[in-house]
Amino acid sequence: MSFIPGTNYGFLFPYALAAAPVLLGVLIFAYLKRGQGVRVPVATLLILRNLQRHSATRKKFVPPFRFFYELLLLTLLLIGAAGFFKEGEHEQVAILIDNSFSMAARNPTDPATTILENAGSQATRILHSLSGQDKVELFTSAPGLRSITEGLVDPATAARHLSDLRLSYTGDNLEGALARISANPNFKRIVVLTGRPVHKKLGAQHEQQNLDTRVDLQSLISDQMRPLMQNAAISAVHLLRSQASKAGYELTAQVEAYTSQPLDVLVTLEAAASPQNPERLRNVSEMRLRLQAASTEKLVFKDLPKGLAAFKLSLRAEAGATKLDLIKEDNQAWVTPETETGEVILIGDFGPQALGLNNLRALSFQHMRATEYESGLADNLEPAPQMLIFHHYLPSKLPTHNSLFVLPHSGNHTIPVLPEVQSAQLTRWQAHHPILSYLNLTPLTLKKIRPLGLPAWGEELVSSDAGPLVIAGEQLAHRYVAVGFEIFPYVGIRAPILSIFTLNALNWISGGGLKSGYQNAGSVIKLPLGTVSARYVGGSEIYRAPTDMEAGSRPEAALPVNGLVQIVQENSKIGLIAVNYFDAQESNLLAAAPLQQPASHSTRTEDLQKYLWTKRLAMVALALCILELIFLFAPFAGRALSKTVISKTKA
Amino acid sequence: MLPAVFTPEFLRQLELLKLRSRRAFLGTRQGGHASLKRGHGMEFSDYRNYEPGDDPRHIDWSVYARSERLYLKLFQEEQDLSVMIILDSSASMVTPATDGKWERARDIALSLAYIALIQQDRVSVSVPGYLHTPFFSGAGGIHNLSGMLQKLSISGVVDFERGVQQAISRIRFPGVAVFISDFLMPFEELERLFNLLRAKNLDISAIQVLGPNDLNPLEGEEQVVAIDSENGDQVQLQLTPEVREDYSYLLQEHNQHLCEFLHQSRISYLLAHSQEELGAFVVDKLSTMALLK
């Protein structure tokens, strides 16, 4: 893209103008060629040659009117092809700031500031360097592309919006965000501020690889600083029922050292005694560790007593080693025991062991036969069951609990079940649904299949040529999943597709019950029915029930950061939800993947459509073409020759 | 086989015509033309003194009676005539083919050859670069001649001057030479060609054949690149009415120049249009030349 100096006009493909002299030459040549007329063999040129000799202006090119007409036409087409456009009054600049979790890292040369704050400062400097007439739009990339300024604003206003910059406990999503921004041709300059290393292609490589030259990638961490970006983090926290003692818990966790040198840390396990007063923590255990460079240390805290409301595991680098742990936010993890949820009831002919469900240690199962369920046994359980799994059995009416129906038999209208088939070809599935996330169903082979009809509450997740195979939906705050093929026994890694599918389904139905007592930061969770308010302990409120809350609907709340959330329900019942975030890609600052210069936007036609001048020029050229066809489409008369000079002898 | 235009009626008309030369030439045998040779002819030529050995039957006794001297009566012998017909074989004679210049030149040559052969003359046709026929005699020779000429396919460039030299080198007895061409060539070249013939002491006639495109070139075209059929030269032209007028004038000027030269060289000249009727041309126009009577 190039601008004509001193104007707001420019060319999208200025190099196309280089063809102008060639085209002019071709046009003149065509006229000279056409002007010669038809080639006719004659007996002899003895006399005809004398006629030519008498023509005084033979060698001059005297273009006719049509030449100028066609020159105009050609010029318009060339300008159009060069992508002539009129830019707005002001330059439009996009600033994309990486606000992913890794940006929480402290600057090793200035520990008082984070990389995200440095990004804000850099953005401020860029904004100050712009003209007051320019327009700027500020974006953040995580968790998805979001405009902070919500449109184009002047640089001063944009600078004020920088205070809205927030860290996101997610991955950076930079490539996707950048692709979306660069699809907009109105941005003359796109500045990306990130902590990741950047790969810039300069000079001729831009042209060769068709890279988007508008994009200016700026890494806030220089190559010299990169080796200093070291960190330690807690990951993979699980609170499980103790295998040795049914009365207690077992907490496992990993401590990751993303460092290039050994690091001494102090690991502390604390517990909150009651959900009413979670701020008051008591020390449960403490240990000092020496983490080797780039190592993982597994921790196990056994025989933790029951009755505690929450556990907090924290990590602290020993004095003098704080520069080896630049992200503080991943140094703590919370976990809550599942005291509030009941067991999972398995209804069918086979018990949990036969179906391999004992391998799922995050859940506890109770077996119940169909006749027992029909007698109403499940409704009287206290506490209420976390979910029901119906195996080869379909109740006569939809349960009032979260339920999973596996290969239901036909016979009633709770869920329509079609006749059994031996094989079916999967035709499509909704990959974005949580139940199918991380799954590629293409290699899945199914043997025994009962296609399902679509109930009113259900959404078809997996389709086959025989009918729907997986249906999921919600009704009256309960989640239901029906599967038209056998998913059990659960054999873990030996049947990875079915195992991941089973875990996803159970997790979705239970609202995250497989997480061993915590939720992921950055997710949206369903709060219990009757929730009045939810707030981070020692932090901000994330939910307060509206006055016009619809009865029966489950409230939702976003969990933006790590921490412990206290939930207050209508009956003064108080619960706790632990929220953690761990992503090795974000915490491992040493191995941050480089950001590549994106390719130029491929659909240039979209760009052209935005530049009205190009369209106008094309329309004018078309109109001129039509006019020429109508009015000038006559045998070419050629250029006029000057009157032949008659030889003196004639005179 | 003669061309289709040689109908029996046209052949009868040709048989009534006689080829003549403006001068007497030595022939090879007895014929219908006055010869330079003195002998047993019908026409008295001269007297000379008797010498022993002369045939006493040619002594004019009446003169001896008056002068008592023996004189011998001399008569001009009538012999046949050598007729050389030279046909222009340059590409201009066949360009454009629709003009029919070559065909007209060939038919005129065959007409003259037929007239000559009927009166027992010897006829040879030369097409420089392509063909030099032997001398035919007798009426039957016309078919051989016609066959040879009709088989010819004229195209390309020939060394015309060299061809003419080859043709005249074959002449042992001077006679009549008829040069049939469009004469659209540089005047210097024409002079050289005619001087070659003149050097052979021939009675020369020139017949110029022009086609419609020679008279009014490229009718219907205005902007053209004219390509010379002989050397491939190209000329870009705008054929406006004024230019066409100029052309006519220049052609006329060329022909006038030619005529003046031919007249000074005692060469008879006739212009033929390729599109006019052959019979009318031969019978009416050709007979006006010194060539026919």
Image: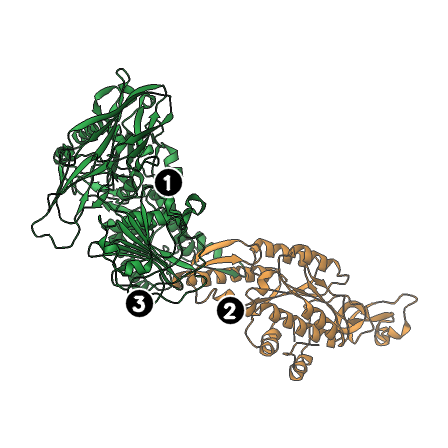
Chain colours: A green, B orange
Q: Position of residue B215 (x, y in %)?
A: 49, 66
The residue shown at (29%, 62%) is A395
> Which mark, residue B212?
2
Separation (CA) of disc 2 from disc 3: 104 Å
In the depicted structure, whether residue B194 falls above or below residue B121: above
Q: Position of residue A120 (x, y in %)?
A: 19, 30
**Depth check, front residue: A620 or A107:** A107
Separation (CA) of disc 1 from disc 3: 61 Å
In the depicted structure, whether residue B280 falls above or below residue A609: below
> Which mark, residue B246?
none
Q: Amino acid at mark 1?
A: Asn
Name of the residue lying farthest toward the left? A547
**Depth check, front residue: B97 or A14:** A14
The residue shown at (38%, 25%) is A295
> Which mark, residue A210?
1
The residue shown at (54%, 65%) is B96
Task: Tell me the SS state at disc 2.
Answer: helix
Question: Callout 1 environment at 10 Å: few (<14), some (14 to 19), or many (20+)?
Answer: some
Q: Position of residue B150 (x, y in %)?
A: 68, 70
Quadrant showing the C terminus of chain A: bottom left
The answer to the question of whether label 1 and label 3 lie on touching residues, with beta carbons closer than 8 A, is no
In the depicted structure, whether residue A372 falls above or below residue B55: above
Separation (CA) of disc 2 from disc 1: 66 Å
Q: Is residue A92 visible?
A: no
Task: Tell me the SS state at disc 3.
Answer: loop
Question: Callout 2 environment at 10 Å: few (<14), some (14 to 19), or many (20+)?
Answer: some
In the depicted structure, whether residue B137 falls above or below residue A269: below
